[in-house]
């Protein structure tokens, strides 16, 4: 067999091998770090409720202290489609800005680097951020086009670049949207960190992350940025063909915590998804807790707010049994 | 330049002149790090304008200093390794009439770089329907960064550059890559007639086109037959009227003008914006602007 004949066959064999691995039962998720993590589930039936009070309730249940810290709020701003629920709701952003000021943060900024659309400021305008968040333009940074600095060792890369606004934050708060995702199964607080990567270097979309691997990139981003907190907007989430083309799903909750793995695992259980079958959560077990026995569920119980999110055929195997 | 529109154009050019960094480049926003991309568009907008020569010379000198030994260009001074902006270096060189060894090495880099999805393994995977996207992986196109997949925007930027330089550096490989790049764009048209930034279909779901990517694709397809482009040009005109994105409007106006249209100037409502790239693109697309610098005429 010549080399020219071998290479395509090797490619097919590798691809087929990968496909068969994907069909195998996933290995047991490791126990994770010592101790347990608090995750608060707070009811919020609509965006017109007093969201600041609801958030304050959840943050206190998680014991978060932000006094004197520079806080960066990272929403999930994706698409010009104000008629649907693709973006984190503007009222969640406004409430979080007020919340962290009230809690004594020295600075509260908002930053986002959308994955596909390049016109970030007009996206924010369309999503209602400019009109809803006081002084929005003075506290918002387009992370795709900010000044950058390198860090070393991200995903084995000698240099990997992030916006200086991200690197300067004492605490990054993932203001994610509760959505299904056609590549990852679910996009929640951890996957939301894709928006920390600058498009000016890695493109629109940030294709480098796809080549590192989507679950691998999610884990690596969360390994890199450890001073984090999550507030997941599940008031109205997205089911079906998320994260963009799905349909609205009323869930009426916000989910919060400092352990983003535990927050996302909790969100998955609320959505009727088995978190132990979600690749990036399995791979992130050394960063936080996936097992329900290691998550201190505060506020509402999962059972009281559980509502199965519709899954596309590709991800039916993720359904929590 | 005495019309109201002319006054608007002059205000955009004035902002560009006022926001050039000390190092000669432009940031995406005033006072921020210089980047290759906004510097390119600012240079194109100011090209040939009286009193801009020194400014343009300083900018060009900076961009040239970002060329790496392999011929590619870095996107800013902080970043190691070249990216898709190498195509913009070639386009700028053509505009400035510079055809030296450095430009040659940039062209060679562009001809060397291909989208990773055209690899043998990926083509085999596509043959056995193992990919989650519907894409014709027989075409090579260009990625944002070497080693990644091809996307519409970097492919368009490479096409603009190679078409512009084709008369100075004619080669069969250049002709082949241009033809193949155009074929890639045509193969990735969405079912609504425009272009998304990548594939038109994922997991058997059609993706919608984006206004800005549709505009860019049309720029890359200059020289194709009218019959091929009638529908996307009509869609672009509709997007021009409907889109809520200032950036998309600016690109659409440039694309429509490069295809012989005469759309209303983009973004007179963006006069308060300090977005340098948007400012430069709006200036380029103005009726008296330099949009012709992005014209490529027929294929190579």
Image (cartoon, coloured by chain):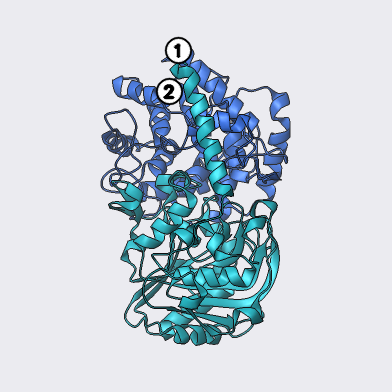
Chain colours: A cyan, B blue
Element under disc 2: helix
* Label 1 or label 2, whichever comes before in sequence order: 2
A145 or A300: nearer the viewer: A300
Q: Please state which of residues B32 and B128 is positioned toward the viewer in this rendering.
A: B128
- Name the quadrant containing residue A218: bottom left
Contact (Cβ within 8 Å) of mark 1 with mark 2: yes
Q: Nearer the viewer, mark 1 or mark 2?
A: 2
Specify whether A217 is left or right of B3: left
Q: Quadrant of residue B165?
A: top left
Asked whether, in this view, residue A88 is left or right of residue A294, the answer is right
Q: Residue at x 66, y 33 (%)?
A: B261
Q: CA distance from mark 1 to mark 2?
A: 11 Å
Image coordinates for residue A29, horizontal then vertical, percent = 47, 63
Up-down relation of residue B171 to residue B187 (above or below): above
In the image: residue A242, left or right of residue A18? right
In the rendering, which numbered label is found on residue B171? 1
* Residue under the point 54% across and 87% down: A53
**Residue identifier under label 2:** B111
| Count of number-bearing discs | 2
Residue B148: mark: none
**SS of the residue at dot 1?**
loop
* Image coords of residue B265 (percent x, y): 60, 44
Q: Is residue B289 visible?
A: no
Work out whether A47 lies above or below B249: below
Q: Position of residue B209 (x, y in %)?
A: 65, 44
Q: Chain of mark 1?
A: B
């Amino acid at each position: 067999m010549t080399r020219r004949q071998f290479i395509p066959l090797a490619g097919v064999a590798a691809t087929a091998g990968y496909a068969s691995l994907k069909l195998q039962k996933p290995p047991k998720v490791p126990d994770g770090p010592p101790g347990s993590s608090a995750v608060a589930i707070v009811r919020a039936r609509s965006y017109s409720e007093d969201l600041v009070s609801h958030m304050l309730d959840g943050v206190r249940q998680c014991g978060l202290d932000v006094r004197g810290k520079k806080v960066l709020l990272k929403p999930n701003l994706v698409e010009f489609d104000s008629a649907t629920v693709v973006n984190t709701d503007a009222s969640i952003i406004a409430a979080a800005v007020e919340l962290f000021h009230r809690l004594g943060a020295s600075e509260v900024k908002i930053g986002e680097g959308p994955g596909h659309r390049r016109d970030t400021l007009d996206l924010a305008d369309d999503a209602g951020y400019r009109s809803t968040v006081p002084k929005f333009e003075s506290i918002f940074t387009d992370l795709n086009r900010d000044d950058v600095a390198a860090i070393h060792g991200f995903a084995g890369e000698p240099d990997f670049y992030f916006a200086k606004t991200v690197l300067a934050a004492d605490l990054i708060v993932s203001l994610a949207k509760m959505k299904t995702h056609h590549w990852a199964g679910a996009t929640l607080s951890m996957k939301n960190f894709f928006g920390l990567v600058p498009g000016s270097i890695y493109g629109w979309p940030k294709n480098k992350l796809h080549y590192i691997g989507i679950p691998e990139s999610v884990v690596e981003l969360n390994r890199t940025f450890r001073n984090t907190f999550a507030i997941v907007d599940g008031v109205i989430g997205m089911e079906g063909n998320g994260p963009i083309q799905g349909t609205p799903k009323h869930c009426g909750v916000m989910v919060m915590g400092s352990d983003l793995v535990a927050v996302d695992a909790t969100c998955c259980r609320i959505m009727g998804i088995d978190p132990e079958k979600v690749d990036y959560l399995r791979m992130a077990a050394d960063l936080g807790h996936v097992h329900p026995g290691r998550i201190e569920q505060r506020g509402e119980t999962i059972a009281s707010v559980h509502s199965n999110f519709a899954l596309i055929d590709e991800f039916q195997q993720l359904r929590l049994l | 330049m005495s019309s109201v529109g002319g006054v608007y154009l002059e205000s955009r050019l004035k902002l560009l002149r006022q926001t050039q960094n000390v190092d000669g480049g432009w940031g995406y926003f005033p006072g921020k790090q210089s980047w290759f991309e906004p510097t390119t568009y600012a240079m194109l907008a100011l090209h040939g304008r009286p009193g801009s020569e020194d400014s343009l010379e300083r900018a060009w000198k900076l961009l040239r200093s970002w060329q790496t030994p392999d011929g590619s260009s870095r996107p800013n001074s902080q970043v190691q390794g070249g990216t898709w902006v190498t195509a913009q270096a070639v386009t700028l060189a053509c505009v400035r009439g510079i055809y030296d060894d450095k430009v040659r090495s940039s062209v060679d880099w562009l001809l060397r770089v291909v989208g990773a999805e055209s690899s043998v393994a990926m083509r085999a995977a596509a043959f056995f329907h193992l990919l989650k996207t519907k894409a014709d992986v027989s075409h090579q196109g260009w990625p944002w960064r070497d080693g990644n997949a091809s996307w519409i925007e970097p492919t368009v930027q490479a096409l603009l550059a190679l078409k512009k330089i084709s008369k100075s550096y004619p080669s069969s490989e250049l002709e082949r890559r241009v033809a193949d790049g155009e074929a890639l764009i045509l193969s990735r048209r969405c079912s609504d007639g425009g272009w998304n930034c990548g594939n038109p279909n994922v997991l058997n779901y059609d993706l919608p086109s984006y206004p800005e990517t549709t505009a860019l694709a049309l720029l890359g397809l200059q020289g194709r037959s009218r019959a091929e482009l009638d529908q996307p040009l009509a869609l672009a005109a509709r997007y021009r009227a409907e889109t809520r994105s200032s950036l998309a409007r600016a690109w659409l106006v440039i694309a429509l003008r490069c295809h012989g249209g005469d759309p209303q100037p983009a973004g007179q409502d963006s006069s308060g914006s300090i977005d340098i790239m948007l400012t430069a693109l709006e200036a380029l697309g103005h009726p008296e602007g330099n949009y012709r610098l992005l014209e490529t005429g027929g294929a190579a």
